[in-house]
Amino acid sequence: MTQVRPTILHVDMDAFYASVETRDNPSLAGLPVCVGGPSDQRGVIAAASYEARRYGVHSAMSTAEARRLCPDLVLLPPDFERYTSASRDIMAIFRSYTPLVEPLSLDEAFLDVAGCERLFGDAADVGRAIQREILHRTGLPASVGVAPTKFLAKLASDLAKPQGFRIIEAHETRAVLDPLPVSRIWGVGPRTAKRLEALGVATIGDLAQRSRDEVVREFGASGAWIHDLAHGIDTRRVTPRREEKSHGMERTFAADVSDRDELRRHLLDFCEEVAFGLRDKGLRGRTVTLKARYSDFTTLTRTKTLDHPTNLGPRIYSTARELLDRLPIAPLRLIGVQISALTDVRAPIQESLFGDPDGTPKLLRGGQVPTRAKLERAAEGMDKLRRKFGARAVVPASLLGRTRARGRDGSDGQPGVAGRAPEPGP
């Protein structure tokens, strides 16, 4: 390994969404609490408290199955505004100790605390201080792993859950790794685990005993990666700002939708949300991708790359609607939009003599199509209102009076980097 001292922290909140709900409603303490969508609408569990997990309930499980396992389940719809607010407080605590913070999601991050010893003590001291401060300032439990590498730090926090603290020293690597199932390796999913088991590799120790060349021949480049991790080798550094590749939103409907006007309204809603998210992150994107899944689970994607990057809802929607109109007409169970080829808003955009740089010709607008500058000014005002009064404070006129449909996890959709995944466990 490239480091001897354990200076990498992995901090992971315990059952984050469910913990926020319990914190805000103490009467839920000790109950099997889950956050997700209703069981009669193809709902799935987004997060499960440890009381619910004792019944076998876990994230990404259907709500119907969760209720079968735990009839007394307390099911709550998600409130991502509250979860995001709590996440901001937690990330601020991290950054008060070190600038080297790499968020992985709302509820977990890597920290590199090398060089902080004179201010806060060694990595173990910093980890315990952060754990205490999170609990004191937010009322939320966290688990902390400390190790020489990112992989071992994440493994340490997983092994410590819930509300635990674990240090893996360099000399303990083999003793910790060898007995663990090979599925504990970062990047080994169910399929790879089955392939490894077919080769007689059940534990990390089994994999470590295989020659690197043999594993690479069987699994290619990923074989080199998992073989290194089986030896505790992980040269990745903590990167404070990971480059975001895409930003999107999708929803699986409670019932299949065939009405094209309704699908267009959903799409408009999504495009406004995605555009707001891009502006909030200081990004623009050029490539618009529409995703649609039919009732027979056939999934189609259509993509168009714009001449110039944008983070304006109307511009994204006009492209997404064009892509939707190209799809075969049939009931859809899922629809989503994603923006990729992202750039920083500070990057210059080449202005055009004959039209806005996003492609709206000045001579053809007739004063009816807003210019990019006008749309940007309007978006800036709307964003201020949304940040002050909530995401639904300002919506397009065509969406007024419309109750947003809930997704399978009970949310208003799944925003994030190519959609929000269910809260990771454990």
Image: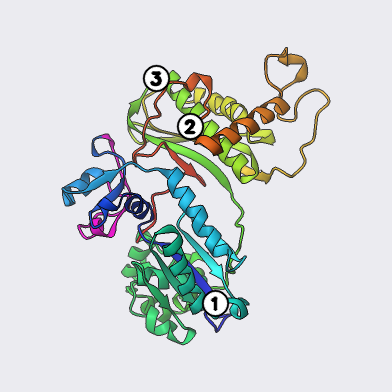
The residues tagged by marks 1 and 3 sit, at their Cα atoms, a distance apart of 55 Å
Is residue 215 in view? no
Q: Residue at the location (33% across, 28% down)?
A: 256
Which label lies toward us, 3 or 2? 2
Q: Secondary structure at mark 2?
A: loop
The residue to which callout 2 is attached is 392
Mark count: 3
Query: Quarter of the image holding residue 314?
Result: top right
Rendered image: mark on residue 259? 3
Residue 153 in the image: state x and y as whole percent: 47, 72
Give the mark nearest the N terminus, 3 or 2.
3
- Front residue of 373/185: it is 373
The residues tagged by marks 3 and 2 sit, at their Cα atoms, a distance apart of 24 Å
What crowding class fits label 3: few (fewer than 14 Cα within 10 Å), some (14-19), or many (20 or more)? few
What crowding class fits label 2: few (fewer than 14 Cα within 10 Å), some (14-19), or many (20 or more)? few
Q: Residue 72 vs residue 63: left or right? A: left
**Identity of the amino acid at label 2?**
Arg
The residue to which callout 1 is attached is 7
- Front residue of 107/96: it is 96
Q: Residue at the location (56% across, 40% down)?
A: 277
Q: Residue at the location (76% across, 19% down)?
A: 362
Residue 193 in the image: state x and y as whole percent: 35, 65
Residue 61 in the image: state x and y as whole percent: 28, 49
Q: Secondary structure at mark 1?
A: loop
The colour scheme used to paint the residues is rainbow
What crowding class fits label 1: few (fewer than 14 Cα within 10 Å), some (14-19), or many (20 or more)? many
Rendered image: mark on residue 336? none
Q: Magenta span has 57?
A: yes
The relative height of residue 372 versus residue 106 in the rendered view (above or below) is above
The residues tagged by marks 2 and 1 sit, at their Cα atoms, a distance apart of 42 Å
The magenta stretch is 41-62
The relative height of residue 209 versus residue 65 in the rendered view (above or below) is below
